[in-house]
Image (cartoon, helix red, strand yellow):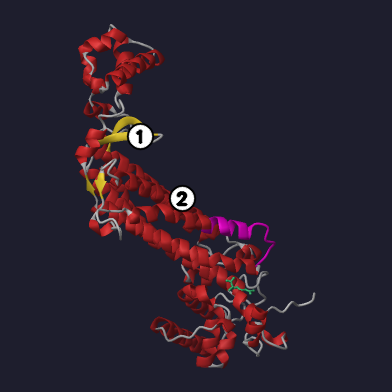
Amino acid sequence: MKRVRNPKVAKTTARKATGANPLWGGRFASGPDALMEKVNASIGFDKELAAQDLAQSRAHCTMLVEAGILTARDGNAILKGLDRVAREIAAGTFTYTAALEDIHMHVESRLAELIGEPAGRLHTARSRNDQVATDFRLWVRDAIDRLDAQLGQLQRVLVDRAAEHFDTILPGLTHLQPAQPVTFGHHLLAYFEMFDRDRGRMRDCRARLNESPLGAAALAGTSYPIDRHRTAKLLGFTGPTANSMDSVSARDFVLEFLSACSIAAVHLSRLGEELVLWASPRFRFVRLSDAFSTGSSIMPQKRNPDAAELVRAKAGRIVGALTGLLVTMKGLPLTYSKDMQEDKEPTFAAADQLELCVQVMAGMMADLTVDKEAMLSATHEGFLTATDLADWLVQKLGLPFREAHGVVGRIVRRAEERGCGLEQLTLADLRLIEPRIKAEAQKVLSVQAAVARRKSYGGTAPELVRKSVAAARARLARRSKR
Ligand code: ARG
C-alpha cells in the first residue's frame, strides 16, 4: 500500500524516536513512528495501576525466589528496587514517557536503572498479558471496596432521614400522576433497598473476579516451576484462575463491574431527578442546602439543583463505559488483543464519577430540609384516597372490587365537577351515587388513615416504616461487621 504523507504525519514523524524499544525491540531495526507511539501508549492512564503493578511484581518476585527460579540475592535486590520505585511514584518524582508504553514497562525499566541486571530477571515466567489482567482485577477489587463503603454511607443517611420522616405524608405517584398517599420515610427506604442490591451486585462481582490470572504468562502457561497458588495468596485472591487462555482474555469482570456501576448510577439518577422535581417551586417538597445549590449569573433569585442534575446526568457516561467495552470485547478472538487496552480509561472514569455521585448524593440527602406542609397539602389534590373508598365498598358492602371501582370513579367525577376533594363531598353527595354508603365511609378518606391502614408486609404505614428503619440499621451493622 502506498503511504499517503499528509503534513501532520510528516511533522510527527520528524519527532519520532530513533531507537528501537528497549524492552521488546530486539527484532526491530528502528523505532516506532511518533503516531505509532501515540496510539499505542497507555501510560497516560494506566499509571493508575502503579500500586497494583508493584504489589503484583513483589508477589511474583517472592514466589520466584521461593520456587528456586530466582536467587534470594536477586530477589532481595528486586524487592528493594521496587520499594524505591514505589517511593518515587508516591513522591511524584517518577518520570513517565510514551516511549515506554505502559506502567509495566515503566516499572521494569526504572528498576533496571536502579538495580541493574537482576531487574531483567523479574519478568521470568510472566507476561504483560497476565500482568495487566492481574493489576486490573486488583484495581477493580479496590474500587468495589471503596464504593461499598460509600454506598453504605449513603444508606446510613437515607435511614436517618427515613427515621425522621416515618410519618411524613406525601403523594405517592405512578406515571408522575397522584396515586396513593405514602410516607416520606417509606419513599426514602425504597432507595435504601436499591443501594443495598447495588452493594450486593458489587459483592457478587468481587467474589467472582477474586482469582489470580498471574502465571498464565502470555497465554499458555509457562515451563518454569512457578506456584500460582502462592502468588494468588500473596495478593489476597482466593486462588489462581483455572485456564491460562481465559486468564489473559477475560474482561467480563470489568463488564460485570461496569454493569453494577451502571445500575447504581441509574438508581442515583432517579433519585437525582426526584430531587430536581421536589426542589422545584411547583412541588416545594424539599429545599436543598446552600452547600448543594447554585445561583445564576444573570437571575439573582435563582437557586438551582445543579448537583442533583449532574448526578442525574452522570449515568450517561457510566452506562457509556459499559456499552463501549461491551462493543470493544464483542468478537475478539482468544487470547489477548491490544483492543483490550481500551478497557481501562472508561472504567477508571466510570468508577471515579460513580464514587463522586454517591458522595454528593449522601451530602445532599443529609443536608436537605423537608417541607412537610407542602407535602401534605399536595395530598389534597388528585383524589389520593379513591382506592380506600373502593376498598370500603368491598369490605363493608361486599361489592366486587371491579364494581366498587366504577362507583368511586363516578364519585371522583362528581368531586371534579364540584372542584373539591373526596373528603369535601357530603354524605348526601356520596349516596346519590351509592345509596348504601354510610357516614363511616368518609373516615377512610383522610390520607392519615390511608397510610396507617397500609400495613401489609412492605407497606407504607408509619408503624411499618419504623420497623423497617430498625431492620435497615441492623442490616447495615451486620454488613459492616463482615
Ligand atoms: N498496556 C497493555 C494493556 O493495557 C498491557 C498489556 C500489553 N500486552 C501486550 N502483549 N502488548 O492491555
N-terminal of the pair, mark 2 or mark 1, is 1
Mark 2 to mark 1: distance in Å?
Answer: 22 Å
Residue type of the residue flagged with mark 2: Ile
Image quadrant assignment for residue 363: bottom left
Q: Which residue is drawn at 36% across and 50% down?
A: 272
- Whether residue 464 sits left or right of residue 240 in the image: it is left
> In which of the image's four quarters is ligand 1 placed?
bottom right
Q: Which residue is drawn at 24% across and 16% down?
A: 441
Q: Which mark is residue 173?
A: 1
Q: Is residue 450 above or below residue 128?
A: above
Total labels: the figure holds: 2
Q: Which residue lies furthest to the right in this view?
A: 1
What is the magenta range? 321-336
Residue type of the residue flagged with mark 1: Leu
- Percent position (x, y) of residue 144? 43, 60
- Percent position (x, y) of residue 426? 21, 14
Q: What element carries label 1?
A: strand
Q: What element carries label 2?
A: helix
Residue wearing tag 2: 263
Q: Which of marks 2 and 1 is in front?
A: 1
- Percent position (x, y) of residue 432? 28, 8
Whether the magenta-drawn stretch holds residue 331 is answered as yes
